[in-house]
Image (cartoon, rainbow, N blue to C red):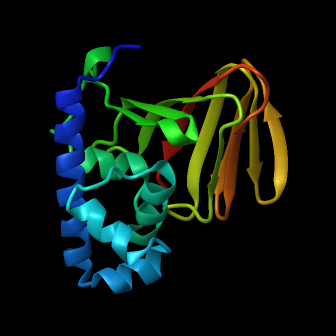
Amino acid sequence: MSQTSNLDVVELETRLAARLAKLRAEHGWSLDELAQHSGVSRSTLSRLERREISPTTAVLSRLCAAYRRTMSQLLAEVEPEPPQLVTADQQAVWRDESAGFLRRSVSPPHPGMRGELVEAVLQPGADLSYDEPPIPGLEHHIWVLAGVLEVTIDGRRREVRPGDCLRYRLWGPARFRCHGDEPVRYLLMTVLP
């Protein structure tokens, strides 16, 4: 995988902070109201919008749920219009070192298209939980390339191994965990309902 330059990361985070502030304004919400909708503290929201801190995967997930967007949709809103051919060096990479999570937007959201493709890597012990889907009924297809991914959907836990594909519609909480001593690498295709 290619590396994203520090300048690209700074530009992305600056645009993301501005987009988060604009989304809140579009909804007519105060910081307190957004805190109630998202479960993210008012002080964290304020610091995110001023770009004093970088959002974690968990915080972005909560904000995406409040705004009814997938994380990829939100990130696509802060990037230039993607070309039809997305070369490896053009694919946006998001890292949450504290959570042990890396996501590459292989085929980012595009106006008029309902699907997107994301490559994800979870480090051993990584455990990501989402309280609700950003969009109810979002279709997921997960194809594991290496390692073992433990996925819990609707209270049902499954181990997905290399070559396996798990598909479902997401209506409630979800949990993704790296099961084992090796990182898990997988492709996630999402399709809007």
Residue 69 spot, x, y in % from top left: 40, 60
- Would residue 173 be found to the left or right of residue 41 on screen? right
Task: State whether residue 121 is above or below residue 12.
Answer: above
Q: How many numbered markers are drawn? A: 0
15 is higher (above) or lower (below) than 134:
above
- Position of 16 with respect to 73 (left or right) is left
Residue shown at 20% from the left, 76% from the top: 26
Report whether residue 186 is seen: yes
Q: Position of residue 151 (x, y in %)?
A: 74, 43
Q: Is residue 111 visible?
A: no
Q: Position of residue 22 (x, y in %)?
A: 18, 68
Residue depicted at 29% across the width and 23% down the height: 4
Quadrant (top left/top right/bottom left/bottom right) for the N terminus: top left
Is 157 above or below relative to 85? below
91 or 165: nearer the eye? 91
Which residue is drawn at the image coordinates 28% and 22% (left, top)?
86
Q: Quadrant of residue 52?
A: bottom left
Residue 134 is situated, as x and y percent measured from the top left of the image, at 49, 61
Q: Quadrant of residue 50?
A: bottom left
Location of residue 53 with respect to 82 vertically, above or below: below
In the image, 157 versus 4, the foreground residue is 4
Identify the residue at horizontal 71%, vertical 35% (top origin).
125
